[in-house]
Image: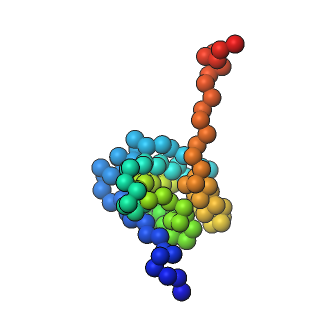
Amino acid sequence: MTSEKDKTTVGRLKSRPQFLAVRAGEARKGPHFLLEVLDRNDPESEARVGFTVTKKHGNAVERNRMRRRLKEAVRLSAGFAMKPGHDYVIVARRDLLNAPFDALTRGLQDRIENKPKPKRPPAGSRKP
């Protein structure tokens, strides 16, 4: 049994304005999904997560299967890596359906824990 202090709770994003607010944050691209992260500057509140699967990725059965796989990956492993006071939106890609589940969970944990590397300036703008 786990004690109450070992459990981490992850809230849910439910309304459209909440999802749109996260788009102003940073985007972390992965092979099976896009992770959007927004720091709410409220470390006392729990992390919140939302899932998006667009209609171009298949019929309702396939979209729901993608969403269920993402929810289970967050529940089992990635929820512990999410920082309090942050909002996360996971936008699924079509490759998510055929990806091995362990690769999905590893990729999700990596994207949550690692910030994207800063982009290099274009070649023409560097000083000699």
Image quarter where the C terminus lies is top right
Q: Which of 26 and 71 is in front in this view?
A: 26
Q: In this view, does 7 lie above or below 18?
A: below
Q: Is residue 11 left or right of residue 127?
A: left
Q: Which residue is drawn at 59% across and 50% down?
A: 114
The location of residue 1, given as percent across then percent down, is 54, 86
Q: In the rendered view, would you say 78 is above or below 16?
A: below
Most foreground residue, 100 or 73 = 73
Q: Residue at x 48, y 54 (%)?
A: 90
Tell me which colouring the rendered structure shows: rainbow
Is residue 99 rendered to the left or right of residue 81?
A: right
Asked if one can make out residue 57 in the rendered structure from this viewpoint, the answer is: no
Which residue in the rendered view is the most extreme toward the bottom?
Answer: 1
Q: How many labels does the image show?
A: 0
**Picture layout, residue 54 above or below residue 73:** above
Q: Residue shown at 61%/16% (left/top)?
A: 125
As displayed, is residue 11 above or below residue 31? Answer: below
Query: What residue appears at the point 49 percent right and 82 percent down from the top-left corner?
Result: 3
Q: Is residue 16 left or right of residue 66?
A: left
The image shows residue 38 at horizontal and vertical percentages of 42, 48
Residue 108 visible in the current orientation: yes
Q: Residue extending furthest right?
A: 128
Q: Position of residue 33 (x, y in %)?
A: 55, 52
Which residue is at the far top? 128
Q: Where is residue 124 in the image (x, y as percent from the top left)?
A: 63, 15
